[in-house]
């Protein structure tokens, strides 16, 4: 949730953020009104309780008619307190509903607009030129015996697949290389649960505009996660952290599930847009004033991984209308895909400021001992989709694939993947 102090001090900044996202700016005024009503209700309830307490002391000392009059007033007060507390509970609920309806306030430098309005920050590497007919990742993978899409569809339906043989080995090699990099950088490696309670899914902001993407198990009242960001955000919910040694950094290795609602007909070939995949996700808790610098560190770690798989890529600053509700800013790294002659997302890193921590009540103590809400950030370090970029950019005329040098130790030293 957004900070109510920010809302009161600079409501226009929140309105501007809503407009930049293409969201309803009038919600800001509705929230301001709800905040005023709640503060008024709290003040009334507090005053009545104080009067009730004082009256109780007077009753104990009074006698006769005075006591009878005080008891009569006490009865009236009790009814008024009950009414005031009910009003306070009602205004609390309305305030929370509206507070959750407003998305995180975007950073000032975020480009306005929608999905196609991103800003390209830089290009790294040059797209390869081939003197033979380029194959797409599915054709290459089938020749290598790396995929089985038909049996995936037979067993589970559209957008499911089997990774077989070298395909499975390649995914494990990628994730192990990412895990090695993360632990060397001081991250704590975690294999989290992939089923979470509703309050954890809601706390991370995934049950808003993107709730249609989430798999829900109704009988268990639980959700399958689309990223280990969700369980890692819930890991310290309701806790007070110690940042004396710096940010708390975790790297979560998990299977991820996405319904891909609204993507009918998009990327139906291969493993670019699927319902299930594996991912290593970085997740960080830190002080709010350190969050922007930490965001740049996460991006640098992502670029370090991309350099290891030796693919051309670009870094984009995602436009406000394409941000998730929790993100104040998001950078994507998109790798070149030769068969499509375009760049496709491989990594994403978001600064969620204190938005998630407010919803999940995750705090830390500052130097004066005062509790403050932590900032949370996340970033992709490797996913199944990376196989697409590796196979296509490193394909050779005979159908084989050159293995990037940094990846070879994680593939038993293999330098080339040969067709079966």
Image (cartoon, rainbow, N blue to C red):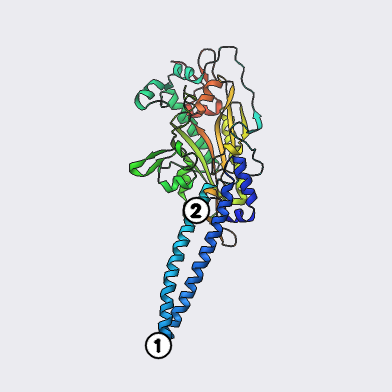
Position of residue 78 measured from the top left corner of the image (x, y, whole percent): 42, 72
State the residue in front, 196 or 43.
43
Q: Nearer the viewer, mark 2 or mark 1?
A: 1
The circle on residue 64 is: 1
Q: Where is residue 272 in the image (x, y as percent from the top left)?
A: 49, 26
Q: Classify the position of the C terminus by image quarter.
A: top left
Compute the Cα span from label 2 to label 1: 48 Å
Q: Is 354 situated left or right of 74 in this image?
A: right
Q: Are marks 2 and 1 in contact (CB under 8 Å)?
A: no
- Residue 97 lies, with reference to residue 110, above or below; the image says below
- Return the residue at label 2: 96
From the viewer's perspective, tell me whether residue 54 is left or right of residue 126: left
Please give left or right for residue 141 compared with residue 339 in the image. Answer: left
Q: In this view, does 363 lie above or below 257?
A: below
Q: Where is residue 165 in the image (x, y as percent from the top left)?
A: 41, 23
* Residue depicted at x 50% and y 28%: 385
| Residue 227, position as x, y percentages in the image | 47, 38
Residue at 62% of width from left, 41% of height from top?
A: 20
Residue at the outermost left position: 219
Residue at (62, 44) in percent of width and height? 17
Local crowd size for mark 1, using a 10 Å CA cut-off: few (<14), some (14–19), many (≥20): few
User: Which residue is at a point 57% across and 20% down the rendered structure image?
Assistant: 338
Depicted 44 relative to depicted 256: above or below: below
């Amino acid at each position: 949730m957004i900070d109510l102090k920010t809302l009161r001090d600079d409501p226009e900044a929140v309105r501007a953020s809503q407009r930049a996202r293409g969201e309803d700016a009038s919600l800001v005024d509705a929230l301001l009104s709800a905040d005023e009503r709640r503060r008024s209700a709290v003040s009334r309830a507090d005053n009545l309780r104080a009067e009730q307490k004082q009256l109780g002391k007077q009753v104990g000392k009074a006698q006769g008619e005075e006591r009878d009059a005080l008891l009569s007033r006490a009865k009236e007060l009790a009814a008024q307190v009950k009414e005031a507390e009910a009003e306070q509970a009602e205004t609390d609920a309305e305030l929370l509903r509206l507070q959750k309806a407003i998305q995180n306030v975007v950073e000032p430098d975020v480009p306005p607009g929608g999905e196609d309005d991103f800003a390209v920050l830089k290009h790294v590497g040059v797209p390869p030129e081939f003197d033979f007919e380029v194959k797409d990742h599915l054709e290459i993978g089938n020749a290598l015996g790396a995929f089985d899409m038909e049996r995936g569809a037979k067993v589970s339906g559209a957008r499911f697949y089997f990774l077989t043989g070298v395909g499975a080995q390649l995914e494990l090699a990628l994730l192990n290389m990412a895990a090695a990099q993360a632990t060397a950088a001081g991250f704590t490696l975690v294999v989290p649960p992939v089923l979470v309670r509703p309050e954890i899914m809601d706390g991370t902001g995934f049950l808003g505009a993107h709730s249609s993407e989430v798999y829900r198990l109704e009988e268990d009242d639980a959700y399958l996660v689309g990223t280990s960001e969700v369980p890692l955000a819930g890991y310290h919910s309701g806790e007070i952290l110690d940042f004396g040694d710096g940010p708390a950094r975790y790297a979560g290795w998990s299977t991820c599930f996405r319904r891909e609602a609204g993507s009918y007909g998009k990327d139906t070939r291969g493993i670019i847009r699927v319902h299930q995949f594996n991912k290593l996700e970085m997740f960080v808790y830190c002080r709010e004033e350190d969050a922007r610098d930490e965001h740049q560190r996460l991006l640098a770690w992502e670029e370090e991984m991309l350099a290891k798989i030796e693919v051309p890529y670009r870094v984009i600053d995602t436009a406000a209308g394409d941000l998730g509700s929790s993100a104040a800013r998001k950078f994507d790294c998109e790798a070149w895909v030769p068969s499509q002659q375009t760049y496709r997302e491989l990594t994403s890193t978001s600064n969620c400021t204190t938005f998630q921590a407010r919803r999940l009540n995750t705090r830390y103590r500052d130097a004066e001992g005062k509790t403050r809400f932590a900032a949370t950030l996340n970033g992709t370090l490797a996913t199944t989709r990376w196989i697409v970029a590796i196979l296509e950019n490193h394909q050779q005329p005979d159908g084989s694939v050159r293995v990037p040098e940094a990846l070879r130790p994680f593939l038993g030293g293999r330098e080339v993947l040969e067709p079966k």
